[in-house]
Structures are given as structure tokens and as C-alpha cells.
Image (tube, rainbow, N blue to C red):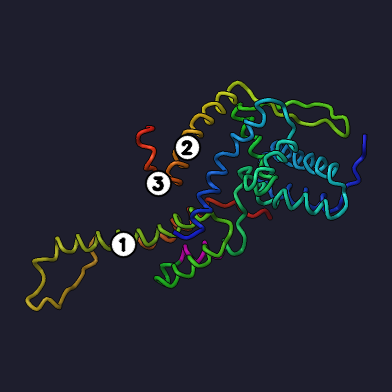
Amino acid sequence: MEPGAASNALSQLRRGALEYCVLALLQRQERYGFELVRSLSEVDGLVTSEGTIYPLLTRLRKDELVTTFWQESASGPPRRYYRLTDAGGAALAAFSEEWSRFRDGVDALLTHGGRHDHDAA
Amino acid sequence: MTTMRRDPLVDDYLRRLEAAAAGLPRERRAELVGEIEEHLEAALAEAGDDEAAVRNALERLGSPGEIAAAAGVAPERGRLETAALIVLSFSFLLPLVGYVIGAGLVLASKAWSEREKLLGLLIPPVVVVAGAVIVVLATEAVANPAVDAQGNEFVVSLGPVEIVVLAVNILSGFVAAAYLSSRLRRPRL
């Protein structure tokens, strides 16, 4: 397989994981758009174009996984804050559980070719 | 309260975003542009608003086209795409060559995703191969007893099966073009 196929697979994984990273960032505290975007950008390779996160936030709000509210800021105009909903929390919990199982399985295959994993399973 | 002195680069970017998002309902478009505007204000409040900071912030955002695409706006049909669709539609006039040129134009375009290109371009060859198989099967069933002793005088008559297959072959270019066209937005005049 050409290297392009691997990078394509990774970009699909990123795209799929991104919305749960947003939900995870909102787990402990409410955040405004810019803050969310910058935190996501700090993860190497997660975000290629920061602007594309805003449509994702809109989708999350439509799916009622997050809600928004306006809050005055100390400097400048009011900001739109995002807050996790109960449904968002549930979606995040479900994803986290599946993700760690998936990650562990893939890691085991990648490092040992899956040989040592049979007795554990 | 600080008042932003807006950089012309920012104004230009927001205008291009507004245009790229023209396919969205008015309310969603205004919201998207507002969010990006807010993002830029926050970014520049943090990094300073000299030209290098502005350029950097805009580069990190990505192109207006990318953002609009992420918001679900289909890419616009440009000249290249229009040419590709016309050539594909009428590719039956120049069998094979017409298809190859049309396919080349489709592949050169950035408006379609790889998946859409593959799907659209597979339609004509699949139809041609399926048509050939059907004709061969139909002809074998009918013509076997009619083969003469030398076996070299083999006349294929244009029966109803052949006519239908031929018509479908001609239409396959149109179908491929119609599918590809449906993935794009009509250009605004």
C-alpha cells in the first residue's frame, strides 16, 4: 500500500475522534469557541484548519450534545460559551469506553502482532 | 472595552467566507461568519494585530472554501467542471476517447472528492461491460444454431436486446455527468 493510504486512514480517524475531543474539553468546564479551538490545535495533527471546528460545534449543538450561552468578557464583546449537555456526557462516556478498548486492541496488534494477547482475552 | 481597528485582510477574508457560504441558509451563514469574526478578534487580541499576526491567524483558520465545505456547502461548479460534465455527457459521440478526456477533466478538478470521482467515473465502464455481457449471452442463446459451417459469417442482428443495451450505453455518460453535477452547487451569476 502506498503511504497516502495510511495518511488517509489517519485523517479519517482524526475526523471521527475530533468531536469527542470537543466534548472531552467541555467535561470539566464551559469554554468559548476560541479557547476550544486553541486547545484542540495543541494536539499534534488533530486540527489542520481551525476554522472547520466551528461548523462542527454547530453540528454538536444541533445534535443537542452541547448548548451555548453568551457571557460578558472582561475585555471586548460578549462571547459564546459552550456547555456539555447530559446527552453529550453520555455520548462521551460511551465513546471513551469503546475508544480505550479499540486503542488497546490496535496497540497490541501493532506492537506484538497480537501474539501475547490471546490469554488476556 | 477595546475597539478593534479592523485589518483589511480580515475584512477581505470575511467577505470571501460570506461568498463561499452563500449556499447556507441566511441565519446559519451569519452565525458562521460571526463565529469566525469572533475567533479572529480573540486571536488578534492575543497575538497582536500586526500584519504577520493577521496572516498567521488567517492561515491557521484555513481557506473560506474549506470552512464552507465543513459547514456542508457543496463546492461550486467552475469552468473545468462544466467542461468535464459536457464531455462526459456526449462521450458516446467519440467512444472511448470522449470518456478518457472527460475522465481526465474530472480527475483534474478539485471540486469532487476522490470517492465521488471514482463513483461517477465507474458508471460508464460498468454499463459498457454489463451491456457487452448481456449482448453476448443473448446472442449465444439465439444465434448458436445459426452459425454456419465455416463459423466466420457471424451476423449480429440488432434485436431489441441490442437496441436497449446501446441506448443504455449512450445514456451512461449522461448518468455519470448527472451524478457528478448533483454533487456541486450551481455557480452564482
Q: Residue furthest left?
A: B149
Give x and y (percent) for residue B7.
87, 50
Residues in magenta?
Answer: B82-90
Give x and y (percent) for residue A53.
66, 41
The reply to whether callout 2 and callout 1 are in contact (CB within 8 Å) is no
Q: Residue tagged by mark 1? A: B129
Is B118 rendered above or below residue A83? below
Amino acid under disc 1: Val
Split into 4 quadrants, where in the image is the N terminus of chain A?
Answer: bottom left
Do the residues marked 2 and 1 share a common chain? no
For the point 66% across and 32% down, the residue is A25
Number of marks present in the image shown: 3
C-alpha distance separating marks 1 and 3: 42 Å
Q: Secondary structure at mark 3?
A: loop
Q: Residue furthest top?
A: A86
What secondary structure is the stretch in magenta mostly built from?
A: helix
Q: Secondary structure at mark 1?
A: helix
Query: Closer to the camera, B173 or A3?
Result: A3
Is A92 rendered above or below residue B31? above
Q: Secondary structure at mark 2?
A: helix
Numbered badge on residue A104: 2
Tag 3 subunit? A
Give x and y (percent) for residue B141.
14, 60
Specify whether residue B148 is in view. Answer: yes
Query: Closer to the camera, A62 or B101?
Result: A62
Amino acid under disc 3: Gly
Decide if residue A119 is on the left or right side of residue B64.
left
For the point 52% across and 31% down, the residue is A95
Specify whether residue B168 is in view. Answer: no
